[in-house]
Structures are given as C-alpha cells and as structure tokens.
Image (cartoon, rainbow, N blue to C red):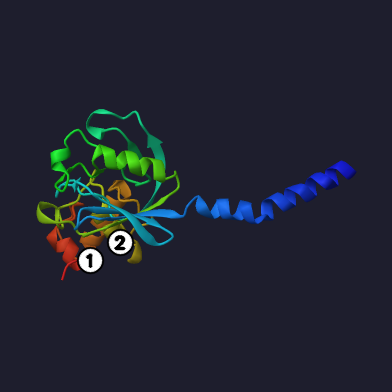
Amino acid sequence: MKKIIIFLLFLQWFIISPQFVINAEEKFEYSLKIDLLEKQLDVYKNNKVIKRYPIAIGSDLSPSPIGTYIITEKSKSWGGGFGSRWLGLNVPWGVYGIHGTNKPHLIGENVSSGCIRMQNKDVEELFEIIDIGTEVRIEGPVTGVGEGEYKNLSVGSKGNLVQLVQGRLKGLGLYNGDINGIYGVKTEEAVRTFQKQHNLSVNGVISFREYLLLGLLE
C-alpha cells in the first residue's frame, strides 16, 4: 500500500511539474498560415512569423481548400511529383497536403490539383519543424476564381462551394447531412426540394440562379 501511495504521489508531481507543462505547450507552439492570393506559406511560433515560403496552389478548376485544418500525416516516401516530403491535411472531401515538387519552376503558379507545393529544400525544412497535430489556416476566395468562380455543382462535386451550399440549405431546414464539401445524394435531394419551392427546373444542379436565390450571389 505504501508503495502505491508513493507511486501516485510521484505520478501527480510528474503531471503537474513545470517541465511537463512547458513540453505539452511546446508541442503545438507552431502553426501555419497559407495565403492563396499571395501564394505564400508563413510559419508562426508563439504567434510570430519566423519563416516565410513561396508556394504553388490549386488551379481555377481544382482549387486549394479554404479553412482551418490540421496536419494528420508526415511522410518522406511519396516521391515523384510530390517531391521529397509530404504533410497531409484532414480536408474532409479529399486527399490534400503540403508537399515538395519535381517542377520547381512552377512555384508561384496556380497549377496543382489543390495541394500546396513547395521547393523541396523548403518543405524539408518545414518537415523538421512541424508536428502532426499542427494547425494550418488556409485563406483565400471561398467562392473560387476565374473559371472556378461559382462553378456549377452536381453529384460528385467537392470543395468549399459545396460546403457553402450545404450550410445554406441546412440553415433553411432542407438538408440534414454533414457539411463536408461532398455533393452526394442528400445534398442533391435538398437542392431538388429548394428548386421546387422556387419554381426552378428540378435537376439537382446548382447554377447561377440557385446561387442567387440562396443568397450566395448579389
């Protein structure tokens, strides 16, 4: 019994000791901010920018996801077009990440399928700094740009525009699924109901008229 009490006292001291608390805080003292308009990735430590890297981002029709995510995977073995390092993100509608490239001349362009590309030397440096669980905030035009701005949506569509539509339909009480950016059967059913209510062609497709009536266009 005496040994158990001593062990519990030691465990209590270990958990509340200053050194333990500091280490727990340090684990996620870093965060990332990605500015899609500036094509720039900033590394924050204790809310101060300590590194800044140029990046390449998604194209108009395959845009990079907007929102706040976390790093869920780190790998050195993806290779090929993914360069020398991979940092995976928990985007709900697909496989997206921050990675290197075998086409460094395209850094600064809108050319990827939605992932964030970096110079291999930069992503290798970032890989050593960032832990799994690190927050990544991606900022940019949620409604898309160029050919992808307010593009038509239907079953199989994915991305931030789908999230916007799902959120608006849920607010109207027409959609009871997850706001996950994936245009599935439940989303289509909600869109069809919305179209019936507004005397639109009932085809389950989001186009200019639906965006307008949903209040997503002015």
Regarding mark 2 in the picture, which secondary structure is present there?
A: helix
Looking at the image, the residue that sits furthest to the right is: 1
Residue 32 at least partly seen: yes
Q: Say what amino acid the circle numbered 1 marks.
A: Leu
Q: Is residue 73 above or below residue 36?
A: above
Residue behind mark 2: 169
Q: How crowded is mark 2: few (under 14 residues within 10 Å), some or many (20 or more)?
A: many
Looking at the image, the residue that sits furthest to the left is: 147
Quadrant location of residue 18? bottom right
Q: Along the line of sight, which residue is nearer the eye, 116 or 195? A: 116
User: Which quadrant holds the N terminus?
Assistant: top right
Q: What residue is rendered at 22% in x and 32% in y?
A: 81
Q: Residues at badges 2 and 1 in contact (C-beta under 8 Å)?
A: yes
Label for residue 140? none
Q: Along the line of sight, which residue is nearer the eye, 199 or 33? A: 33
Residue 189, horizontal then vertical, whole percent: 28, 52
Q: In this view, does 103 lie above or below 37?
A: above
Residue behind mark 1: 214
Q: Along the line of sight, which residue is nearer the eye, 171 or 66? A: 66
- Residue 179 is left or right of residue 152, and the answer is right
Residue 98, horizontal then vertical, whole percent: 30, 43
Q: Residues within 10 Å of mark 1 (few under 14, many from 20)?
A: some
Q: How far apart are marks 2 and 1 (CA)?
A: 8 Å
User: Which quadrant holds the C terminus?
Assistant: bottom left
Q: What residue is rendered at 28% in x and 42% in y?
A: 122
Regarding mark 1 in the picture, which secondary structure is present there?
A: loop
Residue 99 at least partly seen: no
Tell which circle, 2 or 1, labels the residue nearer the N-terminal end: 2
Residue 86, horizontal then vertical, whole percent: 33, 37
Q: What residue is rendered at 86% in x and 42% in y?
A: 3
Q: Say what amino acid the circle numbered 2 marks.
A: Leu
Residue 49, horizontal then vertical, whole percent: 34, 59
